[in-house]
Each structure stands twice: as C-alpha cells, then as structure tokens.
C-alpha cells in the first residue's frame, strides 16, 4: 500500500461534518480490500469486519469528517454568509473555497486590500466573513441553497523528506494508519481478535458518529486513531509531540492504562519509535465516547503528530503514519 497516494486520495475528498457521504465511495473501495463485510449506516459511518465472530472484538476507530463551513445567507449582492464547522477564522481571508451546491462552485473569501484596511484589524468573526462567488443574488440562488457545505481548499504538497502539507489530514491520517495495518496483516491466517473498523462521521461536532457506531458494535477493546499537536513555532515540546518521532501513545484517566502500557511494550520490543502524550482528563477524541459505551470498553488512543491543525495546510510526516500502522499490526498479532 502506498501511504502517500492513499493519503492524497482521502484528503482530496470534500467530507465536511454532515457531508461525509461524499467520501463513502472511496472509503468503501479501500476498506473492501481487507473486509468482505463493509457497510454504511444511517449516520454516515463506514463499518467493516474482519475475522471470526466468536473471538473478542477489537474496534479500530478514525473519523472521516473535516472542518469547513455552512452557508447561512445570500445577501443582496450575491455574497454568501457562512457559519463555521470547526474551522479557524484566522486562516480564512483571501482563501479559495468550494461551495457544494447543486454543482461545485468556486469562490474566494473576501478581504480588504491592505491599502484600505485598518492596520489594527484583528481576525474577523465568522459573522463578518463573506464568500465571493462572482454571481448576483438571483444567479446564486439557482445553484446554492442555505445549508450547503463549504470546503476551504488546500493543495497536497510534498515538503522535505517524508513531510506532507495537506488539508484534512485530521483525520485521514488516522484512517490511512488503520488501512496500512490491515495491509500488513492481510496474509495472516489466524488473528486473536475479530477486527471491527469504524470510519466515523461528525467527530468535529461532538464525536457523534463514534458514539452511534461503537454502541452497535459493542467491542471488547478499542483503539482510536487521531492527530495531535506537533512542536512548531509557539508550541513547545512540553505541550506537543515531534514530527517523525512516531505515534503518540495516550495516557489519561479516561483511557485503559493496561492497553497503553501494552502498546509501549510492543513498540519497545519491535523498535518502533513512539512518544507519550499525557492528558489529565478527557482526550477530546472519539476515545472518550467509545470508552463509556454500554458497560464500558477498554480503550487506547494513538495520535499522529501534526502542525497547523484545522487549517488548509496541515503538516505531518508520513513515517509517523507508517510507524502507527506497524505498531497497530504488531499489537493485533500479539
């Protein structure tokens, strides 16, 4: 499996929270390479099973939605007003966007030229953002409806070495980690678990898809995969992981310590680089909802370090995805 190509395929999908069905065809095709039993549910999750039903179930979770915006109003001049879905206002001005109406419509987030702007101007509130699609109000209303979703466009770019700049690696990087592990395991005749994979919707608006799917699956164990903060300008090593230094194994009161320790032990035995991420409560990921499903699920968290989260230029290292997948495969075989 080519990690970089798979990541690009998934990061190009316009799967804003609530619009994950735009990604279903690609995800079903990829997951069906490893599972003969792939389905979608009414919530927008993609679910697949591997192995015998009489074995303990290990749930693997990653979310497929990305941040974006939603159209709330079309003004008298044809400009679109929007609400945000997890997006950072500071990244918006003069950005290219696509509005997914009756057809994809290209637009630009409007901004004042620096010659006429207030020099002390701060990042605008989302209510002050307007998208210019080059249409009159009457033209816009023929192709765009209130509630249509908007994606902030970014370009998948290779940086130095194995580093990548792309939108939506939160959390398509987690999805690719799971797929890579399944690829490593595809020739294994016997596994100690029944594997359940849930690629879930609406994480960015409250980890909702994971709550629905994990309740239906009722796993014995679970590992959630997401991204977390990497050291960058203004983000110290005390607060974050480092790019290229391996997956971040979560330690938290809400996570199962035995599973976290097992992941650490396997990483040490297999010489897989890893980092420790300590949280003092909830993790802010799908792991929180999975752990309290029904009578409780032993849950671990693996995170891929990432810079510039929730922007169109998220930066990560594909070696971290590779090592995350290798750690997962070793855990499953062990």
Image: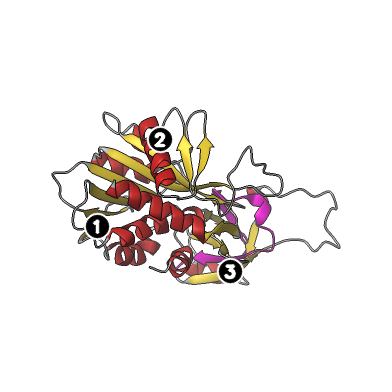
Residue depicted at 27% across the width and 52% down the height? 41
Membership of 82 in magenta stretch? yes
- In the foreground, 68 or 25: 25
How far across and down, in percent of the image, does residue 314 sit?
58, 57
Residue 173 placed where, x, y %? Answer: 46, 56
Mark 3 element type: strand
The structure residue drawn at horizontal position 50% and vertical position 55%, both measured from the top left corner, is: 320
Q: Cα distance, mark 3 to mark 2?
A: 36 Å
* On-image quarter of the C terminus: top left
The answer to whether residue 190 is left or right of residue 308 is left
Task: State the extent of the magenta-drawn residues as a range.
Answer: 75-102
Q: Earlier in the sequence, mark 2 or mark 1?
A: 1
Q: Residues within 10 Å of mark 1 (few under 14, many from 20)?
A: some
Residue at x 36% of width, y 67% of height: 26
Earlier sequence position, callout 1 versus callout 3: 1
- In the rendered image, the residue lying farthest to the left is 54
Nearer-the-camera pick, 153 or 332:
332
Q: Which residue was labeled with disc 2? A: 261
Q: Do tag 3 and tag 2 residues touch (Cβ < 8 Å)? A: no
> Residue 109 location, x and y as percent?
65, 62
Comparing 286 with 106, the one in front is 286
Please rate how many residues cluster around mark 2, counting C-alpha atoms within 10 Å: few if below 14, some from 14 to 19, many from 20: some
Question: According to the image, label 3 marks what residue?
Answer: 157
- Label 2 element class: helix
Vertical order, 270 against 75 (above or below): above
């Amino acid at each position: 499996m080519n990690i970089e190509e798979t990541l690009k395929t998934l990061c190009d999908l316009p799967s804003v929270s609530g619009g994950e069905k735009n990604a279903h065809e690609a995800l079903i095709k990829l997951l069906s390479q490893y599972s003969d039993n792939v389905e979608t549910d009414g919530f927008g999750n993609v679910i697949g099973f591997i192995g015998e039903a009489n074995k303990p179930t290990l749930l693997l979770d990653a979310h497929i939605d990305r941040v974006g915006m939603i159209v709330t109003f079309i003004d008298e001049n044809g400009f679109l007003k929007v609400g945000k879905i997890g997006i950072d206002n500071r990244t918006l001005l003069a950005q290219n966007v696509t509005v997914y109406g009756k057809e994809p419509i290209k637009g630009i987030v409007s901004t004042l030229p620096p010659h006429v702007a207030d020099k002390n101007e701060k990042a605008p509130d989302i209510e002050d953002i307007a998208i210019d699609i080059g249409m009159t109000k009457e033209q816009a209303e023929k192709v765009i409806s209130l509630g249509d979703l908007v994606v902030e466009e970014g370009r998948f770019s290779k940086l130095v070495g194995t580093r990548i700049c792309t939108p939506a690696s939160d959390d398509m990087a987690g999805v690719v980690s799971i797929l890579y592990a399944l690829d490593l395991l595809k020739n294994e005749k016997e596994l100690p678990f029944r594997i359940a994979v849930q690629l879930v919707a609406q994480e960015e608006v409250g980890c909702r898809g994971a709550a629905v799917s994990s309740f239906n699956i009722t796993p014995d164990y679970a590992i959630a995969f997401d991204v977390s903060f990497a050291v960058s300008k203004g983000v110290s090593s005390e607060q974050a992981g480092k790019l290229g230094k391996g997956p971040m194994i979560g330690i938290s009161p809400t996570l199962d310590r035995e599973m976290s320790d097992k992941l650490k032990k396997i990483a040490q035995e297999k010489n897989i680089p890893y980092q420790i991420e300590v949280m003092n409560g909830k993790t802010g990921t799908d792991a929180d909802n999975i752990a309290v499903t029904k009578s409780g699920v032993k849950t671990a968290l693996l995170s891929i370090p990432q810079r510039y989260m929730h922007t169109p230029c998220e930066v990560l290292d594909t070696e971290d995805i590779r090592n995350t997948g290798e750690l997962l495969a070793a855990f499953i075989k062990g």
